[in-house]
Image (tube, rainbow, N blue to C red):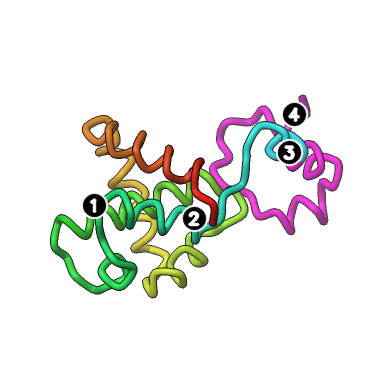
Amino acid sequence: MCSVCSMNNFKYVRSDYLVQHYPQVFEEVRASVMDNRKVYSMKRCFHSVCSWYALTAEELKSRSREQHIVIPRHHFCWAVYRNRIDVSYPMIGRYLNRDHTTVVHSVNTFERMKDALQKEIEGVDELIHSSKL
């Protein structure tokens, strides 16, 4: 494994920076990720979360701050963040018509709650993996 890949202090490195300055490292990382991980679309994650929590797309994208809508919205942001390494916070934010800092907060909040929501996580993951979108 390359020395850059083994560093644990990187949380996020822009792919264009890696391509320009470390093309071999980029190819190693890309190949490793593609070999070990299926890539699911944001649309698939979105509709799986909507199905699991019995919400419409409009409800999940709404400005509502009700808990029965906020937790699924956090779950969607976290699911996309976890399943798609090529999707940035601003891209998720644009999908939900929100700012990227809101998405960062959603991912961090759901990360803290995920132990209590293990049943929901497993249910949505199963829908994501079995969906035909």
* Disc 4 target residue: 3
Question: How far apart in space, not on screen, are marks 3 and 4 (Cα)?
Answer: 12 Å
Picture disc at residue 29: 3
Which of the marked residues, 3 or 2, is nearer the chain's N terminus? 3
Q: Magenta stretch containing residue 133, yes or no? A: no
Q: Tell me which residue sits at (22%, 58%) in the image.
A: 70
- Alpha carbon separation for disc pair 2 and 4: 35 Å
Mark 3 or 4, which is nearer the eye?
3
The segment highlighted magenta reads 1-30
Query: Residue 4: x, y in percent?
Result: 72, 34
Q: How much space separates mark 4 and mark 1, taking CA atoms?
A: 38 Å
Q: Is the Cβ of the residue at disc 3 closer than 8 Å to that at disc 4?
A: no
Q: Which mark is residue 71?
A: 1
Determine the CA span between mark 3 and mark 1: 32 Å
Sequence order check, earlier mark of 4 and 1:
4
Q: Is 64 placed left or right of 111 in the picture? A: left
Of the two numbered discs 2 and 1 on the same chain, state the one appearing first in sequence: 2
Answer left or right for 75 relative to 83. left
Q: Secondary structure beneath disc 4?
A: loop
Q: What residue type is labelled 3?
A: Val
* Residue type at tag 2: Arg
Crowdedness near tag 4: few (<14), some (14–19) or many (≥20) residues, C-alpha within 10 Å: few
Q: Which mark is residue 44?
A: 2
Whole-percent x, y for residue 114 in the image: 29, 36
Quadrant for residue 63, please give it: bottom left
Q: In the rendered structure, which disc, 3 or 4, sits on the residue that comes first in sequence?
A: 4
Mark 4 and mark 1 in contact? Answer it, CB < 8 Å: no
The mark lying in front, picked from 3 and 2, is: 2
Mark 2 Cα shell of 10 Å, populated few (<14), some (14-19), many (≥20): some
- Decide: few, some or many residues near mark 3? Use Cα within 10 Å; few <14, some 14-19, many ≥20: some
| Cα–Cα span, label 3 and label 2 | 24 Å
